[in-house]
Image: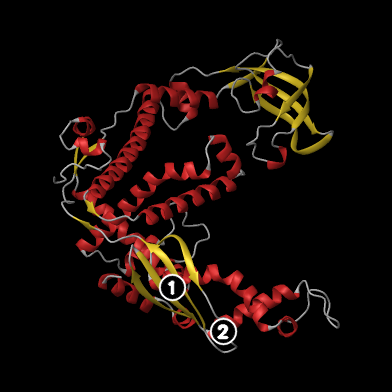
Amino acid sequence: MSAQAQSRSRRVLRRASSKVRAAMQTTVSELPNSRARVEVEVNPDDVEVRIKSAAARLGQEMKVPGFRKGKVPPEIVVQRLGRQAVLSEALESSLADWYERAMLDADVNAVGDPELDLTDLPDEGEPLRFAIEVGVRPKATISDYKGLEVGRLDPEVPEEAVEEELGRLREAFAKLNPVERPAQEGDVVLIDYAGRVDGEQFEGGEAKDYLLELGAGRVLPEFEATLPGAEAGEAKQVEVTFPDDYPPEELRGKRASFGIEVKEVREKELPELDDDFASEASEFDTLEELREFIRGRIADAMERQAEERFRSDVLDAAAEKVSIELPEEIVQGRAEEMWRRLERSLAERGIDPAVYTQAQGKTREELLAEIRPDAEKALRREAALEAVAEAEGIEVSEEEMLGALKPPPGHEDHEHPEPEEALEELRKAGREGMLRDDLRLRRALDLLAERAKPIPLEQAEAREKIWTPENEREEKGVLWTPGSES
């Protein structure tokens, strides 16, 4: 680890609370191929706390004469099972937490899965010692990062976007007039429905006075397809099959039978686009004022998007200026991390990652190979920001951290800890360094964007298409970047 990184690590350790410092000590050694070894020593008191917690969990399932089930004291559990057995259980539940705290304590930016070196379990009153070997983001150097010429979109609001927004507003103020005729696309039908799977009712399968717009695609296609041509008072029966990615997992792939009663057919009547509509739908007196307001709101959104893209492109341009060696295992480790984040995201949305992989028609290894270029790009971007922060000597003050912990505008009345309290909690958890580093890299990106020279997007795209002799390197698998030397 470099002297700068060791200095930063010492600063983080000094800032951490005395409780955290006493609970764990870490020592970092730099290894070849962008790896680091972190020696960890956990305070005996912390080890005993974890043993008692594990014993309390085990005691909830034990049956011991003289004690009710679930009421066996931790010391009796340790006595009957043995300290080493309970310590093994405590390690299984605590190692992930200790690993995270060790990485924070040591200020190590881990990449990929760690390798644990744990040999002997400690006796009572002794600290727990183990070591972690893990990949770390390689150090990089950067040059010519000031005044990068980067394409920036100058957005213009298309009139169609204004009309589409007015159309949505008209839809919101439309009248629904009952009609004595069969339902057709664009109508809204008032229905009651009840569904069954295997003859049994299911949660969410029944509703009264449900308004359904035909053609809006808000229900399963089979369900909606039975309603065009229906009249008020008519009863319908329909069979549907829930898709394999349907949100309630228990309904996926199931066949359901729905009984539908059509109570009314309503025709949608849109209001006229005039000044009366503008005054009813908004605080403006005329339609032209409303149009200008909508145009301004769209322009603001487009400008924010253009700025976000510009900043992203500036970072990509800076990443091209980075001199860095990325070992294969580091890139693969980052790809694995990105894949695990995707799996968690899918699971949170109720999608089985295995089903997702099958739907892609590829193996996990093939999908990981596709992620690798993004993993390398992410590592180069992070390295660029870190290199700029080091080169510029960027430091984050206490005031900046407190400012970052303030509630966002409009949320001041929500339950939110005071910035001073939030920062103190981060310090107690040893996470202050994470916030400081995040703000430091944000400032590095701000600096890059402020110093960059925006050029028309068309000019930037034309530059990329210009052929140079060095382009042949790219065709042969060697990355060429503008300004690179032969």
The residue at 77%/27% (across/down) is 258
| 483 is higher (above) or lower (below) than 194 | below
Q: Quadrant of the N terminus?
A: bottom left
The residue at 86%/83% (across/down) is 66
Residue 199 percent across, percent down from the top left: 84, 33
The 10 Å Cα crowd at callout 2, few under 14, some 14 to 19, many 20 or more, is some
User: In the displayed image of the protein, which residue is found farthest to the front?
Assistant: 476
Residue 149 percent across, percent down from the top left: 18, 42
| 229 is higher (above) or lower (below) than 12 | above
The residue at 71%/11% (across/down) is 180
Q: Nearer the viewer, residue 292 or 207?
A: 207
**Residue 163 in sight here:** yes
Q: Nearer the viewer, mark 2 or mark 1?
A: 2
Q: Nearer the viewer, residue 416 or 99?
A: 99
Colour mapping used in the image: secondary structure
The residue at 66%/18% (across/down) is 266
Q: The residue tagged with tag 2: helix, strand or loop?
A: loop
Location of residue 16 (image quadrant)? bottom left
Q: Quadrant of the C terminus?
A: top left
Residue 237 percent across, percent down from the top left: 79, 21
Q: Nearer the viewer, residue 297 or 301?
A: 301
Amino acid type, mark 2: Pro
Amino acid type, mark 1: Arg
**Is 367 on the left or on the right of 215, as rendered?**
left
Q: Which mark is residue 427?
A: 1
Q: Which mark is residue 69?
A: none
User: In the displayed image of the protein, which residue is found farthest to the top?
Assistant: 181
Q: The residue tagged with tag 1: helix, strand or loop?
A: helix
Counting labels gives: 2
Question: Which is more N-terminal, label 1 or label 2?
Answer: 2
Residue indicated by mark 2: 122
**Is 343 on the left or on the right of 239, as rendered?**
left
